[in-house]
Amino acid sequence: MGILPVSCIDQCDGPCGCNPVFEVEDFSITTFSAETLFRADRNFEVDPNRFYFHQTLYKAFWVSGLKPVSEIQPAKGFIFSNAALACSPRESYSVERLKSIRLINKRKVKINETLTLEEGGVINENFRMTQNFQQEFELAKFIDNQHRFIKNERLYLKFIAVPNQNIELFFDLEIELDNGSVYIFNESMKVNGG
């Protein structure tokens, strides 16, 4: 009959058995990137000279620059996360949360008989947010969740109004984080009329 050392029993008594428990370091956001995508069964880059059906055209944005938290805060001994109980590495999250997204129209455009977007107006209600193309959210509801960004995660904005003719939207995409940082992108989208 063999005898197991006490340290082995202690290590194997957790939620992972004898498997290692991974600690993942969160990050701080330094920059975002944005691009327009056409989506059919997968994402395609858009042709800047072509108009696309509004249900398949997305404005994507993501964290493109980050710093590990240890590079921002001086280390004080060992740091253990409450989430370190997972048996495989958890996702790495931003320490910042999404505070607001504002889409500000840059040029007056008539969408259809009932909708004209005025220059300088906030046009958030004409867009929906998705993370996976399966579920869409109103921007206000998505922001209320105080989203923390995951490494390599893309968020997608879709224009939901149905234009009567081909239109080109010009707008600023303004992303604000809870630490006061604001990122502004000058964007456009060419939408095919119905």
Image (cartoon, rainbow, N blue to C red):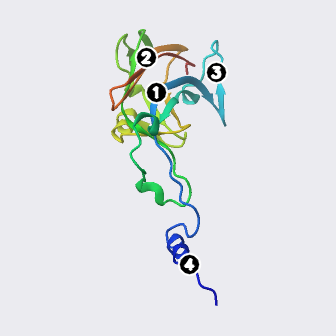
Check disc 1 and give the amino acid type.
Thr
Mark 4 and mark 2 lie on one chain; the one further toward the N terminus is 4
Answer yes or no: do the residues labelled 1 and 3 have beta carbons within 8 Å?
no
Q: Earlier in the sequence, mark 4 or mark 1?
A: 4
**Marks 3 and 4: in contact by CB < 8 Å?**
no
Closer to viewer: mark 4 or mark 2: 4
Task: Classify 10 Å Cα crowding around label 4: few (below 14), some (14-19), many (20 and above).
Answer: few
Q: Identify the residue under disc 1.
A: 30
Q: Mark on residue 46?
A: 3
Q: Residues within 10 Å of mark 1 (few under 14, many from 20)?
A: few
Label 2 and label 3: CA atoms lie apart by 19 Å
Lower position in the chain sequence, tag 4 or tag 3: 4
Q: Which residue is tagged 4?
A: 5
What amino acid is found at the position of numbered circle 2 in the picture?
Asp
Mark 2, secondary structure of its residue? strand
Q: Helix or strand or loop: what does disc 1 sit on?
A: strand
The residue pinned by badge 2 equals 172
Q: Residue at x 56, y 23 (%)?
A: 35
